[in-house]
Image (cartoon, rainbow, N blue to C red):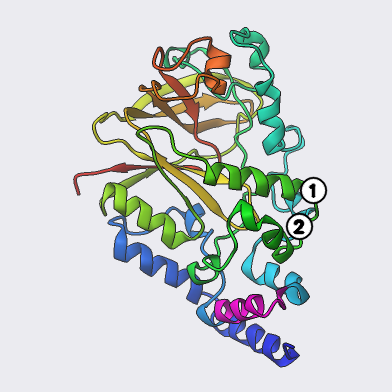
C-alpha cells in the first residue's frame, strides 16, 4: 500500500522543480536537433513530470496501485484519464461545430461510392484534394483542422515504455487510465492502436512515437540532425469555404522525402510519423472569416502503392498511381524536412 507521505513528497518535489522536466526535453532537443529550440507548441507538450515523479508513478503502476491515485497522476502528468476529457481546453469557438469524432469522420466517407461528386463529398470540408484545386483566389472547403485532444502532454520515455501500448493488452491499458467501455476515449484508443499496428504500405517507413525522445530519435534516424519544421499556424478556417491566398512551395526535393507526423487521439501525446516517397510541402494562406491562416499542405506524387479503397480515391475518382493526392496538416501536426546544415 502506498503511504500518503509518498504523494506529499511528490507535491513538494513538484513545487521545487517546476521547470526541470521541460529543461530535460530542451536538453535532449539541443543534443540531437540543430535548431536552437523546438516550436513553442511542441515544447509545451513536454512531460511536466520530473525524474523522481516519473519513477514514483512507475512504481505505483507496477504495484497496480496507480488507479487509487489516478486523478492525482492525470493532473500532474497532464494526460487524459476521463471520458469527459475531450472537452477540456479545446478551442472555445461557438462559431465552430463540436469537434468531429475521430471514427465518425471515417465512417462519413467510407460508405461513399467511388466517384462521388466533390460537391457532395466536401460537405464539412475536403480532407483530400488535387494540387490544381489550390490556386490563388480559388475557393476551398476546409475540414476540421483541430486536434480533438490538443492539450495533452507526452509521458516521459521511462514511463511511456511501461504502458501496454497494443491491442492485445487494450483492457489493461484502459484500466490504467480509467477508460469506460464504448466511451469516446475507448474508440480513440482502438483507432490509434489500429493505426499504429497496421502494416506499412510498400516503401513506407513509420512509427508511433509515445514520448518526445522517441519522436526526436525517429527524426534523426530518417533525416539526420539538420532539419526544418513546418506546421499549420492555427485552426482558423475549419468548416469554412475559404479563399486561397498565396501558395508557396517550401520543400520540393522528391529524392529526400520529409517526415510527416500526425497527432493521434490517446490519453497521452502520441505521434504517428511516416516517410513516403515523392512528397512536396507547400505553405498556403487561407482567408477565413476572421483572419488569414498560414496552413501547411502536403502533396503525395507517388500513390501507386496506396489502397485502391483509400478515401482519397473515393473522393477524387481515380485509382492508385494515376494522380497526386494532397491534404492539410492539422493542429499539432508537424512536417520535418532535411536541410544541408
Q: Which residue is located at x 55 percent, y 80 percent? A: 55
Is residue 64 toward the left or the right of residue 218 in the image? Answer: right
| Rendered view: 336 above or below 266 | above
Image quadrant where one finds the N terminus: bottom right
Main secondary structure type of the part rendered in magenta: helix
Numbered label attached to residue 183: 1
Q: Is residue 318 left or right of residue 180?
A: left
- Give the residue drawn at x 57%, y 55%: 269
Q: Which residue is mark 2?
A: 179
In front of the other: 37 or 129: 129
Is residue 80 visible in the rendered image? The answer is: no
Question: Is 322 rendered above or below residue 276?
Answer: above
Percent x, y of residue 214 = 43, 59
Check if residue 254 falls in the magenta segment. Answer: no
Q: Answer left or right for 236 relative to 5.
A: left
Distance between the alpha carbons at the discs numbered 1 and 2:
7 Å
Q: Is residue 201 above or below residue 40?
A: above
Q: Residue at x 59, y 48 (%)?
A: 193
Residue 242: x, y in percent? Answer: 58, 20
Q: Position of residue 232 (x, y in %)?
A: 49, 38
- Look at the image and give the residue range highlighted in magenta: 53-66
Q: Is residue 96 visible?
A: yes
Amino acid at each position: 500500500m502506498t503511504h500518503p507521505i509518498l504523494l506529499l513528497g511528490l507535491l513538494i518535489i513538484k513545487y521545487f522543480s517546476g521547470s526541470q522536466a521541460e529543461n530535460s526535453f530542451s536538453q535532449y532537443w539541443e543534443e540531437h536537433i540543430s535548431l536552437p529550440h523546438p516550436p513553442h507548441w511542441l515544447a509545451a507538450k513536454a512531460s511536466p513530470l520530473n525524474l523522481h515523479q516519473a519513477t514514483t508513478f512507475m512504481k505505483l503502476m507496477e504495484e497496480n496501485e496507480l488507479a487509487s491515485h489516478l486523478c492525482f497522476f492525470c493532473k500532474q502528468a497532464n494526460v487524459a484519464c476521463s471520458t469527459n476529457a475531450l472537452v477540456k481546453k479545446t478551442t472555445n469557438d461557438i462559431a465552430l461545430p463540436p469537434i468531429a469524432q475521430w471514427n465518425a469522420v471515417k465512417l462519413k466517407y467510407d460508405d461513399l461510392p467511388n466517384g462521388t461528386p466533390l460537391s457532395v463529398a466536401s460537405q464539412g470540408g475536403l480532407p483530400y484534394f488535387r494540387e490544381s484545386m489550390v490556386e490563388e483566389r480559388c475557393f476551398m472547403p476546409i475540414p476540421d483542422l483541430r486536434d480533438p485532444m490538443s492539450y495533452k502532454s507526452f509521458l516521459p520515455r521511462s514511463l511511456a515504455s511501461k504502458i501496454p501500448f497494443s491491442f492485445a493488452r487494450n483492457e489493461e491499458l484502459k484500466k490504467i487510465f480509467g477508460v469506460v467501455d464504448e466511451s469516446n476515449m475507448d474508440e480513440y484508443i482502438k483507432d490509434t492502436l489500429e493505426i499504429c499496428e497496421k502494416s506499412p504500405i510498400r516503401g513506407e517507413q513509420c512509427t508511433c512515437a509515445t514520448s518526445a525522445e522517441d519522436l526526436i530519435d525517429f527524426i534523426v534516424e530518417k533525416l539526420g540532425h539538420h532539419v526544418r519544421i513546418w506546421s499549420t499556424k492555427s485552426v482558423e478556417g475549419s468548416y469554412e469555404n475559404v479563399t486561397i491566398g498565396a501558395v508557396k512551395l517550401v520543400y520540393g526535393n522528391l529524392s529526400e522525402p520529409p517526415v510527416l507526423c500526425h497527432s493521434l487521439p490517446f490519453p497521452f501525446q502520441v505521434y504517428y510519423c511516416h516517410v513516403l516517397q515523392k512528397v512536396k510541402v507547400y505553405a498556403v494562406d487561407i482567408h477565413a472569416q476572421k483572419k488569414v491562416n498560414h496552413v501547411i499542405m502536403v502533396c503525395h506524387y507517388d500513390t501507386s502503392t496506396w489502397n485502391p479503397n483509400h478515401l482519397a480515391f473515393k473522393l477524387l475518382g481515380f485509382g492508385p498511381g494515376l494522380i497526386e493526392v494532397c491534404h492539410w496538416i492539422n493542429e499539432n501536426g508537424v512536417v520535418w524536412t532535411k536541410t544541408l546544415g
